[in-house]
Amino acid sequence: MTVPLVAHCHLGLGKLYRRTGQRDQAHEYLGIATTMYREMDIGFWLEKAETDLTHLSQ
């Protein structure tokens, strides 16, 4: 069972790693958050996680 709180934690860790320049870790956690939000069909947060992944690629 996927829990929204766990997905939010992954999103937060991904954002933290992105801000500190740890791109590999950021990509891992943002990818996990994106997958979890997609599985739970939580579009609002999925969009935010996907946006962060896009910014990471730039």
Image (spheres, rainbow, N blue to C red):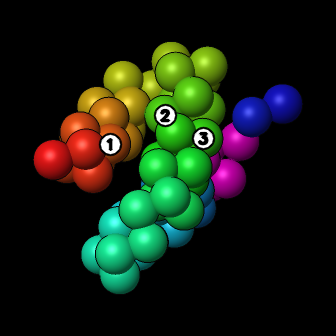
Q: Are marks 3 and 1 in contact (CB under 8 Å)?
A: no
- Which three-letter amino acid code belongs to the residue tagged 2? Thr
What numbered label is drawn on residue 34? 2
Q: Are marks 3 and 2 in contact (CB under 8 Å)?
A: yes
Q: Is residue 52 magenta?
A: no
Write the residue at 35% across / 67% down.
18
- Which three-letter amino acid code belongs to the residue tagged 1? Leu
For label 1, the crowd category at 10 Å Cα-Cα, with few meaning under 14, some 14 to 19 and many 20 or more, is many
Against 51, residue 11 (above or below) is: below
What numbered label is drawn on residue 32? 3
Write the residue at 25% across / 44% down.
57
Q: Which residue is mark 1?
A: 53
Location of residue 56 in the rendering, given as x and y in whole percent from the top left corner:
27, 51
Q: What segment is highlighted magenta in the picture?
A: 3-7
Q: What is the secondary structure assignment of the residue under circle 1? A: helix
**Of callouts 3 and 1, the N-terminal one:** 3
- In the image shown, does 35 or 4 lie closer to the viewer? 35
Against 52, residue 47 (above or below) is: above
Whole-angstrom CA distance, mark 3 to mark 1, is 11 Å
Q: Nearer the viewer, mark 2 or mark 1?
A: 1
Left/right of residue 55 with respect to residue 53 in the rendered view: left
Against 10, residue 36 (above or below) is: above
Q: What is the secondary structure assignment of the residue under circle 3? A: helix
Left/right of residue 58 with respect to residue 28 in the rendered view: left
Location of residue 39 in the rendering, given as x and y in whole percent from the top left corner:
61, 19
Write the residue at 34% across / 75% down.
21
Location of residue 14 in the rendering, given as x and y in whole percent from the top left corner:
46, 61
- Which three-letter amino acid code belongs to the residue tagged 3? Ile
